Amino acid sequence: MGSSNRLFNRQRTVYEILGGGLVADVMLWRRGNLTMGILLVTLAAWVVFEKSGYTLLSLVSNVLLLLIGILFLWAKSAAILNRPAPPLPELYLSEETVNEMGAFIRAHVNDILSASKDIALGKDARLFFKVAGYLLLISLVGGLTDFLTLGYTSLVVVLTVPALYERYEDYIDSYTILGYRKMQQLYVKFDSKFVNRFRKWILEKQKLS
């Protein structure tokens, strides 16, 4: 299928749009075992939170407490028995890594602040309605479910929808483009029958007044 028959006339594949690499491999099930493992672990965590009454903070605290307790006892027993200490990765953040993270966060925060200023001063009505729509949608979804269920559902969507789309993209693109063209035709008919008449009626009223 040519690029003219693709959604948004895109030239790149789904894999390329997702950035390639490990993230794209996981989202498109090219590393099926890893993707399935993420889904199962997330499902288990969701069940633990929902059924046990644990909160995220209490669970993380308990896991960290258990981890440092095991490592501490392992290190002490290794020193007494002349055994090697527990293998730990290098726990160190380089200055370059911190600077890159800081620059990334600063750029995105500045973009958000700039957009917020434009909205507050009424400079970008289109952006205002877009943000208001997203916030309203988040509010409605938040009222229907809790944060954990929403997070798990979002992960399931992220790990299934792109893979399904890549597999059936020819059918999805063709039917979506066909539906879009039908909607355009209906809009043209509606505009010619009702909107133009309404405009003419307004103009006639203004002339008479």
Image (spheres, rainbow, N blue to C red):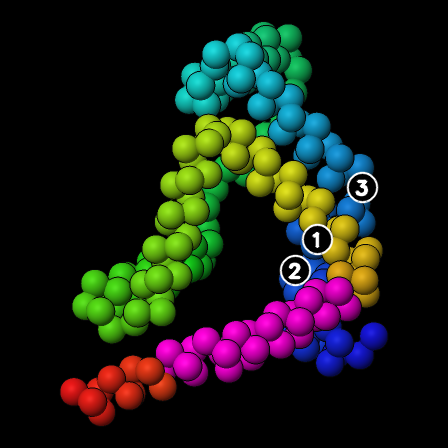
The amino acid pointed to by label 3 is Gly
Residue positioned most to the bottom:
207
Distance CA(mark 3)–CA(mark 1) = 14 Å
Counting other residues with Cα less than 10 Å from the Cα at mark 1, is it few (<14), some (14-19), or many (20 or more)?
A: some
Tell me which numbered mark, 3 or 2, is placed earlier along the sequence: 2
Q: Is residue 111 visible?
A: no
Counting other residues with Cα less than 10 Å from the Cα at mark 2, is it few (<14), some (14-19), or many (20 or more)?
A: some
In the image: residue 152, left or right of residue 121: right
Residue 130 placed where, x, y %?
A: 39, 61
Which corner quadrant of the image does residue 1 belong to? bottom right
Q: Is residue 155 magenta?
A: no
Tell me which numbered mark, 3 or 1, is placed earlier along the sequence: 3
> Which residue is under mark 3?
32
**Which sits in the foreground, 169 or 207?**
207
Q: Is residue 195 magenta?
A: yes
Counting other residues with Cα less than 10 Å from the Cα at mark 3, is it few (<14), some (14-19), or many (20 or more)?
A: few
Where the C terminus falls, by quadrant?
Answer: bottom left
> SS of the residue at dot 2?
loop
> Which residue is under mark 1?
162
Q: Which residues are magenta?
A: 173-199
> SS of the residue at dot 1?
helix
Distance CA(mark 2)–CA(mark 1) = 9 Å
**Residue at horizontal 46 percent and vertical 23 percent from the top:** 56
> Which residue is under mark 2?
18
Distance CA(mark 3)–CA(mark 2) = 17 Å
Residue 70, above or below 130: above
Residue 154, above or below 131: above
In the image: residue 39, left or right of residue 134: right
The amino acid pointed to by label 2 is Leu
Residue 141 placed where, x, y %?
A: 46, 38
**Residue at horizontal 30 percent and vertical 71 percent from the top:** 124
